[in-house]
Image (tube, helix red, strand yellow):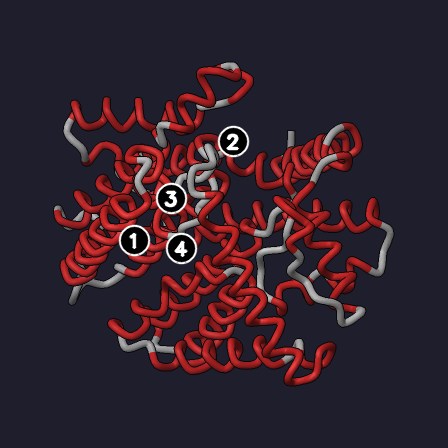
Amino acid sequence: MDFRLRKRLAVAAVLLASGLAFGLRVRNRMVDFTVNYTAGERIRGGETLYRAEDGHYQFKYSPYCAMIYLPLSCLPLSAAKGLWFALVLGATAAMIILTRRLLGPSPPPASWTASVLPPFILAKYIVREIDLGQINAVVTAVLLAMAVLLAEDEAARNPGKSAAAGFLWGTAVSMKPYAVIFLPYFFYKRKWNALWPGLFILAASFLIPAVFYGFPGNLAVHLEWIESLSKSTAALLTSQDNVSLLAFFMKWTRNVDLARLAYGGTVIVLSLAVLVFIRRGRGRPGTLPAESGLLLLAIPLVSPLGWDYTFLASLPAVALVVSRFRDFPVPVRAVLGLNFAVIGLSLYDFLGRGPYAAFMNASVLTLDFLLVGAALFHLRMARKI
């Protein structure tokens, strides 16, 4: 069979399966999208976005992010869900393609495995993202596009690509503040051509909601956002699906002050490790893919509300470790293989209600992905990436 025909048949099969999945299951779910859809309706009417009576389903993003959902809120909910489902699927495909482009060809025989295996390892998180109707896949795709442009700028010295990368970074931060993790990196690497466009987009994203609220109302709604986050975050730190380092220490110590102290100390240690990681690559070409992969991996760990499905951002980090699997000693390969199995197979349907709850409440996934970060660190110290 002709390769092009096989490719078209494969795409058709994926589209058919996706349509069936949406029609039979997803369209009746997507609870997080429904929250954001409601925010789109509210901002269109100039109403407050952050309401205590919404309880667990309170909108937690910036006012600008609510504007993303404004056009969708003009459609019936079922149609809006269908469009968002298609967008998240497209973003997921873009993540895979951009990761491949960012990392470049893998050393044989790892090339095929590095393209196919990482999405399967992270399939649980991708499916959960789609099932909830979340926005993390879109944000991750934007950040990966940013990283690709920065890597191409480093290779070809094209300031235009760096500026475009900055616009993408600012867009990502305006959607999800956790993307600000790249800000210190821009300063340290002196990527001024990317920094200033990004800051311009952030300033614009702050001001644009004034179209609906006026300038005093815009300031008030941003303050409401900060207040709602400060009030709601504490209650979510012991949620079983929260995989952040702060949640890890909260679950294990059950002491707020001790958990915060341990979290702060760990973040300092990890920040120093990232600094060493970057300095080790100084003077060598092609170091940006590994550095951006490490920062993306750190997002769910450092963010206080790092939900398990946010680990889909670790795709480049997982792909790097898989592509360099043969560079590890045999015992380390065995540990990493088991670690990837735990990451991929920690399924509710597979473990059952009780064991799955115990697994998540023990924050095992936090340790699993810290191990992925340690594997990246080893590769950088050995100058393999």
* Dot 2: element: helix
Q: Amino acid at mark 4?
A: Leu
Q: Which mark is residue 102?
A: 4
**Disc with the residue nearer the chain's start (2 vs 4):** 4
Q: Identify the residue at the far right of this view.
A: 76
Q: Residue at x 28, y 35 (%)?
A: 253
Label 3 Cα neighbours within 10 Å, binned few <14 / some 14-19 / many ≥20: many
Contact? badges 2 and 3 (CB < 8 Å): no
Tag 3 residue: 244
The foreground one among 330 and 215 is 215
Contact? badges 2 and 1 (CB < 8 Å): no
The foreground one among 273 and 225 is 225
Q: Picture coordinates of residue 365 (x, y %)?
A: 37, 32
The foreground one among 13 and 319 is 319
Quarter of the picture containing the N terminus is top right
Q: Picture coordinates of residue 221 (x, y %)?
A: 62, 71
Label 2 Cα neighbours within 10 Å, binned few <14 / some 14-19 / many ≥20: many
Q: Which mark is residue 124?
A: 2
Gap between marks 3 and 4 measured at Cα: 26 Å
Q: Nearer the viewer, mark 3 or mark 1?
A: 3
Label 1 Cα neighbours within 10 Å, binned few <14 / some 14-19 / many ≥20: many
Q: Amino acid at mark 3?
A: Ser
* Dot 1: element: helix
Q: Residue at x 27, y 28 (%)?
A: 336
